[in-house]
Image (spheres, rainbow, N blue to C red):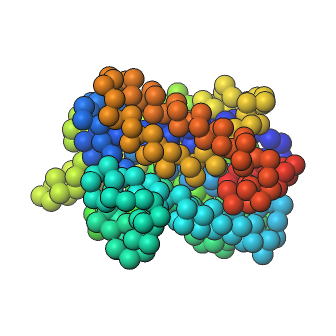
Amino acid sequence: MINKRRYELDWLRVIAFGVLIYFHAAIFFVPFGQPLIQNEETSTMLEHFIHVSSQFRLALLFFISGVGVYFARRKLNERAFVEERSRRLLIPLGVGLLFVVPPMVYIEKVFLSKFEGSLLDFYPLVFTTGVYPEGNLSWHHFWFIAYLYLFCLLAIAPFRWLANLDESRRDWFLSRFAGLGLYWLIPFLFVPEVLLRWLFPGFRDLIHDWASFTLWFIVFLAGYCIANRVSLIDDAIRVRQLSLLLAVISTLSMYGLFEEPGPDLSTFENSMVGYVLWCGLRMTMVWCAILTCLGYAGKYLQFSNGLLNYLSEAVYPLFILHLTTLVAFGYFIVRFDWSVGMKYLALSTSTIVFILCVYQVGIKPFDSMRLLFGMKPIAAPVDGI
């Protein structure tokens, strides 16, 4: 059990959500993906960045969220935990669906010449034209909050089971994953991946996404379990170089065998062996990438400072506002006669600076705004989302 603050986990959370901004900024400069505002010139380097990071970045976010839930739950009974999660997740989800996503869709539709008029004229169409991208109703990146809330509810029974074990049995169970046992999670990820990915390659709508849903729920539970036993984090530090090596080998193997880490599953229609191999390499890459991040963060980021304290609170509003801000700035920046690198740097940097200014002036000082953005009241301790 972690009885003192592990600052590397706070750093890892901040860095992971920060990378998310750079990931979404890169989508403006590749020939696929959403948002639909696209730069005329594309970047192969950013395309590779998206392909590789797509395999594990969301799993890492859910892993970190599992760790954060451990810190939140150990101070609360089950009812208080559900109330606290509902307040910190459902309120921002509602704010996002009603006020953050519609302007984003509006800007896209104007850019694509699919709508003319003001945002006020557009707003009623959000609820009457069907589902995005053909229609205007969407949850965009707020699907993450909805999934996380469901994970918190579904995990109550496993949380209770683990908490009710006597200390010796809990230690025995968690010790199965000590040392190189950390890699035992790969088979637990591999089996549902093979069984589900073919059927549910998945759009994040809770209907066609059961493969990813299962993967993320398992790593969410893994984050919670690792937070129960501090020695597992120390084990991740000790095997960080092996984890990095395995992550690199599995990634290069996916490129070498399948041209890119995330190929179209139709390429496996006549090759079940290829499909199984791809699932195995991908799950190895996902978990080893998470262990690599955890291990190197534990080695080099076991400290706190003013920047960490500030960003630990700011990261949730950054997540909520980042995609709409990227779309608003991207609407103008992609029209400039600049290089791709200059546009990408301008887009990502201006987004971060703008949101931090909004956060500092309009969100952080006011408990009412903190509530809307899923933050704790002023002076309350920060344990993550």
Residue 24 lies left or right of residue 153; in this view the side is left
Q: Quadrant of residue 239?
A: top right
Residue with the most extreme front position: 117
Which x, y percent locates residue 39?
29, 37
Residue 250 lies left or right of residue 237; in this view the side is left
Residue at the location (76% across, 46% down)? 364
Indicate whether 318 appears above or below 343: below
Q: Is residue 161 visible?
A: no
Residue at the location (80% across, 47% down)? 365
Quadrant for the C terminus in the image: bottom right
Indicate whether 3 appears above or below 373: above
Which x, y percent locates residue 21?
50, 40
Indicate whether 320 appears above or below 30: below
Residue 233 lies left or right of residue 57; in this view the side is right
Residue at the location (72% across, 40% down)? 360
The residue lying toward the viewer, choosing from 283 and 25, is 25
Which x, y percent locates residue 236?
61, 37
Q: How many marks?
A: 0
Q: Is residue 317 visible?
A: yes
Residue with the most extreme left position: 270
Residue 344 lies left or right of residue 159; in this view the side is left
The residue lying toward the viewer, choosing from 209 and 309, is 309
Which x, y percent locates residue 4?
83, 42
Indicate whether 8 appears above or below 126: above
Residue at the location (12% across, 58% down)? 270
Q: Quadrant of residue 9?
A: top right
